[in-house]
Every structure is written in structure tokens, then in C-alpha cells.
Image (spheres, grey):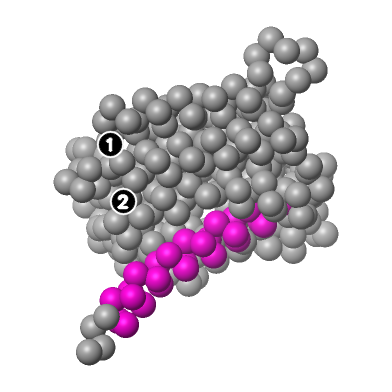
Amino acid sequence: MNSQPRSLAATLFPIGLLLIAMASIQSGASLAKSMFPVVGAQGTTTLRLIFASIIMLLLLRPWRAKLSASTLRTVIIYGMALGGMNFLFYMSLRTVPLGIAVALEFTGPLAVALYASRRAVDFLWIGLAVIGLLLLIPIGQTGAGIDLVGAGYALGAGVCWALYILYGQKAGAENGIQTAALGVMIAALFVAPFGIAHAGSALLTPALLPIALGVAILSTALPYSLEMVALTRLPTRTFGTLMSIEPAFGALCGLLFLGEVLSVAQWLAIAAIITASVGATLSLRKESPPLVAAD
């Protein structure tokens, strides 16, 4: 008699964690932009990852993870993808509104979903995604659209996000939530040279440290820990479908916290990318393997 409520709770728990993670990371991104005038996107990423790695080191004790040579390789790639995703995303936020940056970045996970499915209907989802991109980046129209360099950074972050999903799911299955801590530590080591070279001693500005700590908690320590739990408890289809609404979270946080008002065309573009992602995820074959990288 109690199996059904338990099953429902087991299903809703990781979904709730994932929704909290998405709201947290976009709120943290809004807060992070306030640090750009002092240490730049490079320094902001560095401080975020350093603080997050310290927090996760203390809480999760990643040294207890069992690492073989193969596992270590997976975790290193996962960590570098995590660092690249954060770094390139913040670089894009210098000139691109939050919601649009998230939508462009989301083409990475969308590509993963489309690659795993490869049905005829996927041409519809690819078409929707392309329409969304063209609405966001109307090439050749003077004064229209968004900064192309910033858009390029966001798309690069999307590539890293795809690698984060592929390698994160595999690494998480081997070591659970401790993988998130290991990944953030590697990401911090990967990004720190860029931040130090750009910001130098400004990284030690006392007034900046509490903000950096808040960004680290909201944007890294909390959401990536929750996502790692969700990654290992949700089917690929469910995880991908839920992640599809991340651009909407970004646009709403940009509107609420940064006053970034998007045009109707930009909202339609975000909606097109979200629809393409949901459609691609739902069209995955049941027998498709999990979205993890092959050895």
C-alpha cells in the first residue's frame, strides 16, 4: 500500500532538486555580474570556483572517492568542462543579457539530446533551434541582435555544457556526489590562471569576498551538488526535459534582478530553443543508452 507514495516521492525528490539548482544558478549569475566592474568576468569565475571548491572540500570530503586511472581521466575532463562552461558563460554575460546567454549556451545539451535520438522528427527540433538562433543572432542586420563575440562565448559554453553532461553522468555513477567536489576543484585550478592574470591583487579586495562567497554557494556549491544527485537518479529523458526550461529561468532572473528587458522576438527565440530541447528529449528512444561518453 505504501509503495506508490514512496515511488512518487522518489520521483519528485530529484525533480525538486533540479528545479532548485536551476533557480539557484541563475540567481547566482545575476549576483556575479555586480563583480565584473572590479575583477572582470575572469576574476569573478576564479573567485566563484575557488570559494566553491573550499566549501565542497569541507562538506563532501572528496578525498574518500575511489579513483582508478579511467575514473580519474573522466573526472578531469568533467572538471575542465565545468571550468570552461563557467568561464565562457561569464565572458558572454559582459555583453549579452542573461536569458539570451543561457539560451545560446543551451544549444550544447540540445545537441547531445539530438545526437542520442537521430529520428526523422529531429529535423523539426533542429529547425526550431536554428530559428531560435537566427532570431537571437540576426547576422547582417546593423544594430540588430546581440554582440557576436559574446554570443560566441555563450555557444562555446554550450560545448562545455555538453561535455559536462556526458562526463558528469559517467563520473557521478562511479563516485556519486563526491564527483561534484572533485570537478569544482579541478575547474578552479583550470580557470585560476586566467583570473589572476586579468585581475591580479584586485581578487583580494575585502568588500568583494562576501559577494564572491554568495556567488560560489548559489552558482556552484549548491546547484552542482544537487545536479549530481539528480543526474544519477533521473532517466536521461526526464533530466533533459527538465533542464530544457533553464533558459526561461535565466530570462526571468535577468528581468527581476538585472532589469534586462527582452524583446518579443528574443522571448520567441528562447521559447523556440526550449521547445526544440523538450521535443528532442521526449523523442529519445526508450532503448537509447544513457548520455555518457564512450571509453
Rendering quarter of residue 229: bottom left
State the residue in front, 137 or 162. 137
Quarter of the image for the N terminus: give it: bottom left
Q: Residue at x 68, y 42 (%)?
A: 98
The answer to whether residue 91 is above or below residue 244 is: above
| Element under disc 2 | helix
Q: Identify the mark nearer the N-term, 1 or 2.
A: 1
User: Which of the labelled discs sits on residue 116, or is there none?
Assistant: 1
State the residue in front, 261 or 162. 261
Q: Residue at x 63, y 25 (%)?
A: 135
Label 2 neighbour load within 10 Å: few <14, some 14-19, many 20+ = many
Name the spot of residue 94 as percent of width and height, x first: 73, 35
The answer to whether residue 140 is above or below residue 231 is: above
Name the spot of residue 253 as percent of width and height, x first: 70, 53
Name the spot of residue 36 as percent of width and height, x first: 77, 43
| Element under disc 1 | helix
Asked whether residue 35 is drawn in magenta, I would say no
User: Which of the labelled discs sits on residue 236, or is there none?
Assistant: 2
Q: Amino acid at mark 1?
A: Ala
What secondary structure predominates along the stretch shown in magenta? helix
Q: Is residue 23 left or right of residue 166?
A: right
Q: Residue at x 67, y 57 (%)?
A: 27
Q: Which residues are magenta?
A: 5-30
User: Does the CB distance between marks 1 and 2 fall below 8 Å?
Assistant: yes
Asked whether residue 18 is drawn in magenta, I would say yes
Q: Amino acid at mark 2?
A: Thr
Rendering quarter of residue 165: top left
The answer to whether residue 33 is above or below residue 234 is: above
